[in-house]
Amino acid sequence: MKIVLASSNKHKVQEINDIIKNQFNLNVEFILPPEGFNPIEDGKTFEENSYIKAIEAWKISKTWVLADDSGLCINALGGKPGIFSARYAETPSLRIERVLKEMDGISKDKRDAHFTCAMTLINPKGEVEFKYQGICEGSIIEETRGKNGFGYDPIFLVKGDTRTMAELTEDEKNLVSHRSVALRKVLNYLSDRIND
């Protein structure tokens, strides 16, 4: 079973296919959307943006589609960068720089944050088949650590661990990340549906 992943990010497709291969006995492969996928993400929440991407990909593929919208929410910044996580500055390093600058002077006990990932699965009829929101709790440290991962991973200290998301191995990250939490729910749903 092939499912279109409503994203132009090859890394994300690879990450999800790796999770399936390593953690699930499921004959599902995620592929990039056809040419012309260019959604306007003007939703107010992760869930709304996830649906916008899913329905746009469905319009050009008319098949199973999974979309996710994810980002970093920092309590001390009122939930920012939130849905603007990928657009908080021009490059990943500038985005991290901006967050660290905005967090300057905030004490260690007030640096709580979480990654959120809202997933929407659309069936070939264009209906929402399943949706789920995955969360990974943690906090923001004062300097970058680690070379793995991407985005805000180097400044996100995973709750219950002494390492940042960027210091975890790919396999370790795939057990705790917001995306893998949401994806496991989606894949469990698909597994039940396929095996019915």
Image (spheres, rainbow, N blue to C red):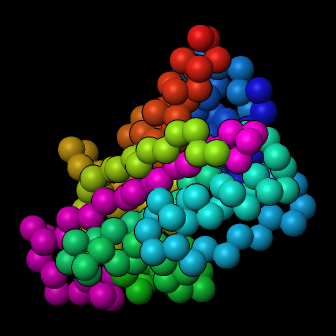
Residue appearing at x 58%, y 39% in the figure: 129
Which quadrant does the N terminus fall into? top right
- Residue 13 magenta-highlighted: no
Depth check, front residue: 8 or 156: 8
Position of residue 79 measured from the top left corner of the image (x, y, whole percent): 30, 74
Q: In this image, 54 relative to 189: left or right?
A: right
Which quadrant does the C terminus fall into? top right
Position of residue 93 measured from the top left corner of the image (x, y, whole percent): 52, 78
Depth check, front residue: 73 or 65: 65
In the rendered view, would you say 84 is above or below 171? below
Residue appearing at x 62%, y 52% in the figure: 67
Residue 182 visible somewhere in the drawing: yes
Q: Residue furthest right?
A: 35
Depth check, front residue: 41 or 157: 41
Position of residue 182 measured from the top left corner of the image (x, y, whole percent): 46, 42
Depth check, front residue: 143 or 47: 47
Q: In this image, 151 relative to 127: left or right?
A: left
In the rendered view, would you say 184 is above or below 82? above
Residue 68 lies in what quarter of the image?
A: bottom right
- Residue 121 magenta-highlighted: yes
Q: How many marks?
A: 0
The magenta stretch is 100-126
In the rendered view, would you say 20 is above or below 67? above
Residue 98 lies in what quarter of the image?
A: bottom left
Residue appearing at x 52%, y 27% in the figure: 189
Residue 150 visible somewhere in the drawing: no
Q: In this image, 145 relative to 147: left or right?
A: left
